[in-house]
Amino acid sequence: MSSASETAYELLKQRLVAGSYPPGAQLKEEPIARELGLSRTPVRAALKRLIEDGLATVDAGRGVRVAQWTDADILETYHLRSLLEAHAAQRAAQRGDPAVRAELERLNREMAAAIGKGGADMVLRLQAINSRFHRTILDGSGSPRLKLLLASIIDMPIVVRSFFVSTRADLQQSLQHHKDITAAIASGDGEVAAQAMQLHLRLAAQRFFQRRAEFVQAQQPAGATRPPDSQHLRT
């Protein structure tokens, strides 16, 4: 991807994650290209990548549109995760598999190193590490039914991309939560492990909406108001 396409992709990606466009809004190449001072070719490439990410959709005759993720959808996703993953953490603690504990500790070290290193690809690395962490706990639960229910929720696009609106302090807090969950699982106390997971996901949801609101506000000119048909935060 060219530097121009990468620039368009990164900005549009942040806007989509932050909810700057209402669900279903059409993303037209020409106005976006004009706004960003680019030709339509890099914008077209950026939109194609956003479709692959699951943040946008394309329909014959309707063009590229913002994926339909409302605030209610996001809240429900986090709520389902807090219920189901808490149960997974409880089962993992009760089963007490040393290999699960070792892998979680390794992933925590990897996450700490990624945050410390930073760089342009930090967010992508953290996404992958975070996914492996939660999937390790899911595997550690030993429940095929939980795996079936949670497999798609853990990596839902809008949740995964929440890292793009996270601050470094948010990332450090998330890492500490992972360490707390790991310690609870290692202790064998299922109730504490479940509580640690629920706290982690509830605070993650709160942070997401807070950072998203801040990003949207920062993108608006001074004194501007949000269009009445836009989906704004309702928390």
Image (cartoon, helix red, strand yellow):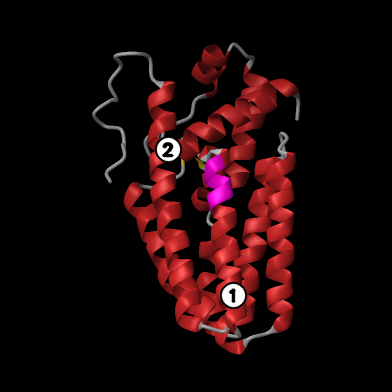
The residue shown at (43%, 46%) is 207
Question: Can you tell which quarter of the image residue 138 is in?
Answer: bottom right
Q: Nearer the viewer, residue 235 or 182?
A: 182
The picture places residue 56, in percent across and down from the top left corner, at 52, 41
Q: Is residue 182 above or below residue 140?
A: above
Q: Residues within 10 Å of mark 2 (few under 14, many from 20)?
A: many
Disc 2 secondary structure class: helix
Is 76 placed left or right of 113 in the picture? left
Residue 24 is at least partly visible in this image? no
Q: Nearer the viewer, residue 205 or 113?
A: 113
Q: Where does the magenta region start and end?
A: 169-173
Q: Amino acid at mark 2?
A: Arg
The residue shown at (75%, 30%) is 1
Residue 213 is at least partly visible in this image? yes
Q: Is residue 73 above or below residue 163?
A: below
The picture places residue 33, in percent across and down from the top left corner, at 57, 17
Q: Is residue 36 above or below residue 151?
A: above
Q: Amino acid at mark 1?
A: Leu
Q: Name the disc covering residue 138, or none.
A: 1
Is 69 placed left or right of 52 in the picture? left
The picture places residue 222, in percent across and down from the top left corner, at 34, 13
Main SS class of the magenta portion in the image: helix
Please name the residue that numbered disc 2 is placed on. Answer: 212
The residue shown at (24%, 28%) is 228
